[in-house]
Amino acid sequence: MSLSEILNSIRENSIKKDVLRQEIQVIARRITRMSKQAIFLAHKDRVDEAESLLREAGNSLTKLAEISRDHPSLFYTGLVDSAFEEYAEAQVFLSLIKDGRFIGPGEIGVPEEAYVLGLADVIGELRRRSLDLIRRGDVEGAERCLNVMETIYTEIMGCDELLILIPGLRRKCDTGRRVIEATRGDVTTEARRVALNNTMRDLMRILESRTSHERQ
């Protein structure tokens, strides 16, 4: 084979790889977009729509996996990793809302490291849900969200090896700790406000009953 033929072969392979790389990027962006939208719908309690979007995103993940079998070097890029993390975050968050349980990486078909990073991000979504529940007057629901947030943080922090071996995880946990502290303050403040209002209401009833009795 001449040098010209060798270089032409390399050029053709490079062009094919570039086409695949662009396809992977398009698919990864689609997965990220649908996962973000699913999280938005979950916050609106539009669970069926969120599940439908995640099923579509899951099909796109399958397509990525098929491409990776022949070209693994193109698969593990920052864009693909972000798509996996966003998808994992959406799946875990939706499972907690719908079934009250943690879904595992094997159930949703994502790499374990991406799952853990996505799990850490769920803390932020639970804060948002907690604040929504407070606005609706559901303090108990907000407290349940806080408990789950603390569970995620405590369990991850208990795995020292993960904090060392998974890049970016410790930073996410540091952010999660601050989010939990802020949420605990919000929930505590609201719980005290509700308790005070209930006490005042009970006191007013007692006073009104006593006044009515005295008039009689």
Image: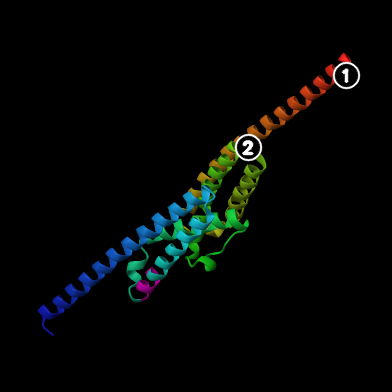
| In-front residue for pair 50/129 | 50
Q: Quadrant of residue 211?
A: top right
Q: Look at the numbered disc 2 and give the secondary structure of its residue.
A: loop
Residue at (12%, 80%) from the top-left corner?
Answer: 5
Q: What's the amino acid at mark 2?
A: Gly
Q: Earlier in the sequence, mark 1 or mark 2?
A: 2
Q: Which residues are magenta?
A: 64-69
Residue at (33%, 73%) from the top-left corner?
Answer: 71
In the rendering, at what x and y percent does residue 40 appear? 47, 49
Magenta segment main secondary structure: helix
Q: Is residue 85 above or below residue 5?
A: above
Q: Which mark is residue 137?
A: 2
Mark 2 crowdedness (10 Å alpha carbons): few <14, some 14-19, many ≥20 = some
In the rendering, at what x and y percent does residue 133 appear? 59, 41
> Label 1, on which residue?
213
Quarter of the rendering occupied by the N terminus = bottom left
**How many numbered marks have been drawn onto this rendered protein structure?**
2
